[in-house]
């Protein structure tokens, strides 16, 4: 049995015909090095956006099932064209939709979770010596309806396949060289990391570093799939994401800024057991993902609960906010979409008071007002206004000597 | 049980967002009249052409399987958008790909034949009160690979579904008002027919009238599915296509001209049993469809065989022509793609020498040279140069008083 490599190419990597040909060459190169190769691929460039626009020209509230039917075509076009490009290089290849690849999901359209992957067809095609191209981002539910996996879906497809088939590694090709100590578009001095642990990457992904979706990193950690993030436009080695015990401890590893969030506060929540459960289960039923949660007790028997949501989910949240207020008997809901989350991440942060105080000192010196704080063993995050967050990122990068 | 109507909308009927909304209204109107409605739909406007172009930018010889994977996305986009448009009119609806609709085909990619339709899902969705939108032109083979049905595929899907589910009728919506006595773009005096028999329509379809593909008419005749051809842009009643015994006999019903053909001659074919079989089975294996076949004996033991092929198939034919010559031991192959087929069709033609002589007399008066002649009980066709064919069509329309 040959070792299997799973490669994932994002939308910018297959943005036009020349890029598709370029990707085809990379894939054949890997195959020629003696590996079995499975590739997952996203829709070309802005295809998905164009399809979404068409849907909204037709209906203000298109059903999720039909939206998935529509969006799944984007990846299907990519796999067919990429397979043709590989064929024209003279290599046996076959493209598979999510359904054909046996990617079975639950039925939450637009945000489906993979239940399992039936690898029979994958194994047959690899056994026949073929490169296999799989449509990312999609699967099929038990009614044979097409589902899509939502944000970061193609990364998740790649890692899930790598886990299911026992691949030696999963390479995520993107338009940047790997994982940086901070967003290189925003911090000039940002430097590339050679290795990082799943946990650190997870914090960075969750914190908006944007290179990898947290779902895919979680899945890779769970099944111990070695991940590599690298550029599809050059041969640089990129960043390896591995188990924490393979990593030398570094106090602060990276800084991230997420400005795709809004802060929501539910004020005057009765202080009774089960209220928070009720609040967050209503949000979950409405498919609104909540991040950073803070609860302050400010008056007796009355709490304020604040949390952040993705900016995209804010409109959905506001639609149900009246119902929510009534269900839990709270007084008022406020929101602010001009905030950002600024975070530092590193395995050495836990219990290191020097790091903590340097972090807050830096923000104090910049005159930045902190609205929410949240910490874990490997990160400190705070919600501040967007401008302050940008200034803070530069300054923290310098203070922690990450360049 | 409600009566079921199957409606088919072609690419021009769903060419843009407004047209899709218009089609959605028609469908809901039909549903509101008390029918169960199944709709098949083609890819929007020029979508298929754009996809084919992309494929050829990548590969000069893309595999048929991957081509089908690519092209099937066109109809998938249409069904999702049309379903959304119907939803926004407040009607329950569901879209189904060929695979989901249970359209099982053989494995000849790009030209697949429907083997059977498993109507379980269709029946369930109709039972739930939903309008069902099915992707035309596509199916799935026994390996779960996507196939496409080739020319006229969406018409064929509609008729096949109507036959499988026992629909009361199958309406083919198009950009013309119905079936005319001649192509109205070419003959000003052409008039619309209210009724025509399957057999006459079959001859007209085969002869290039272009409104309906012969495969769909054959299928409708075989399963006795009443067909209606009408415009998606107005409420005119269109043309009904029914059994011959429901039709009053008309001597000459219509005239058609097909200029999408090329004439091929295989010269110096040995006059031995089995040679014609060998010739045409090689063509069939190479998926080259042959129409009008003429064999002339001009020398002892040596024959010339001429036939017509679709212009699209000519390139494929020329690729195998050397192999063909060698296999059957013929001398030479010639071809001419500047010809056209001109035909008159009508149930009263059989044995009516007046019609036959008027036909040839008209062409003689125009000075048109006839290269091949073929007749059946309800038609006379001949192959002539394209210019002569156009003049002939006008003149014959006038002589047979079809306006």
Image (cartoon, coloured by chain):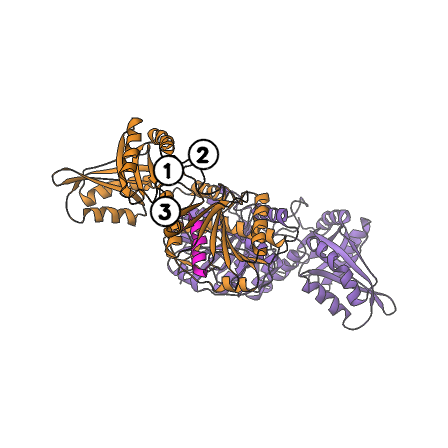
Chain colours: A purple, B orange
CA separation, marks 1 and 2?
Answer: 13 Å
The span shown in magenta is B149-166
Give the mark nearer the N terminus: 3 vs 2.
2
Dot 1: within a 10 Å radius of its alpha carbon, few (fewer than 14), some, or many (20 or more) residues?
A: many
- Among all residues in the image, which is located at the extreme right? A300
Disc marking residue B185: 2
Answer yes or no: is residue A212 visible: yes
Left or right of A211 on screen, residue A301: right
* Image spot of residue A154 (x, y percent): 55, 55
Instruction: Find out whether residue B158 is within the magenta segment.
Output: yes
Determine the main secondary structure of the stretch shown in magenta: helix
Q: Is residue A106 above or below residue A204?
A: below
CA separation, marks 3 and 2?
Answer: 20 Å
Camera-side residue: A278 or B28? B28
| SS at mark 2 in the image | loop
Camera-side residue: A100 or A207? A100
* Image spot of residue A193 (x, y percent): 60, 52
Q: Residue at x 51, y 52 (%)?
A: B76
Q: Which residue is mark 1?
A: B255
Give the mark nearer the N terminus: 3 vs 1.
3
């Amino acid at each position: 049995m040959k070792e299997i490599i799973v490669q994932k190419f994002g939308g910018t990597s297959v943005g036009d015909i020349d890029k598709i040909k370029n990707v085809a060459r990379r894939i054949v190169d890997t195959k020629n090095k003696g590996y079995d190769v499975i590739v997952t691929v996203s829709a070309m460039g802005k295809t998905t956006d164009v399809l979404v626009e068409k849907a909204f020209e037709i209906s203000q509230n298109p059903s999720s099932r039909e939206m998935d039917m529509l969006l799944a075509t984007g990846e299907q076009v990519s796999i067919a064209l990429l397979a043709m490009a590989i064929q024209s290089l003279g290599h046996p290849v076959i493209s598979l939709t999510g359904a054909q690849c046996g990617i079975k999901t639950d039925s939450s359209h637009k945000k489906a979770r993979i239940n399992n992957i039936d690898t029979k067809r994958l194994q047959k095609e690899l056994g026949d010596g073929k490169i296999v191209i799989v449509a990312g981002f999609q699967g099929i539910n038990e009614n044979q309806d097409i589902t899509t996996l939502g944000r970061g879906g193609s990364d998740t497809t790649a890692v899930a396949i790598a886990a299911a088939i026992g691949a030696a590694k999963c390479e995520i090709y993107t338009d940047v060289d790997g994982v940086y100590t901070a967003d290189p578009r925003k911090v000039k001095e940002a430097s590339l990391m050679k290795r990082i642990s799943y946990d650190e990457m997870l914090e960075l992904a969750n914190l908006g570093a944007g290179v990898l979706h947290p779902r895919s990193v979680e899945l890779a950690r769970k099944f111990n799939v070695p991940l590599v993030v690298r550029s599809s436009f050059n041969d640089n080695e990129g960043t390896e994401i591995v188990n924490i015990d393979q990593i030398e401890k570094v106090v602060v590893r990276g800084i991230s800024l997420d400005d795709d969030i809004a802060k929501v506060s539910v004020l005057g929540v009765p202080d009774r057991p089960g209220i928070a459960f009720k609040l967050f289960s209503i949000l979950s039923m409405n498919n609104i993902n909540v991040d950073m949660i803070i609860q302050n007790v400010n008056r007796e028997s009355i709490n304020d609960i604040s949390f952040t949501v993705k900016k995209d989910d804010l409109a959905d949240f506001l639609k149900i906010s009246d119902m929510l207020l009534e269900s839990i008997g709270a007084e008022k809901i406020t929101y602010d979409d001009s905030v950002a989350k600024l975070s530092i991440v590193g395995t050495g942060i836990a219990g290191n008071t020097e790091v903590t105080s340097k972090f807050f000192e830096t923000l104090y010196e910049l005159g930045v007002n902190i609205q929410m704080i949240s910490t874990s063993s490997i990160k400190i995050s705070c919600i501040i206004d967007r401008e302050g967050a940008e200034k803070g990122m530069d300054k923290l990068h310098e203070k922690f000597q990450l360049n």
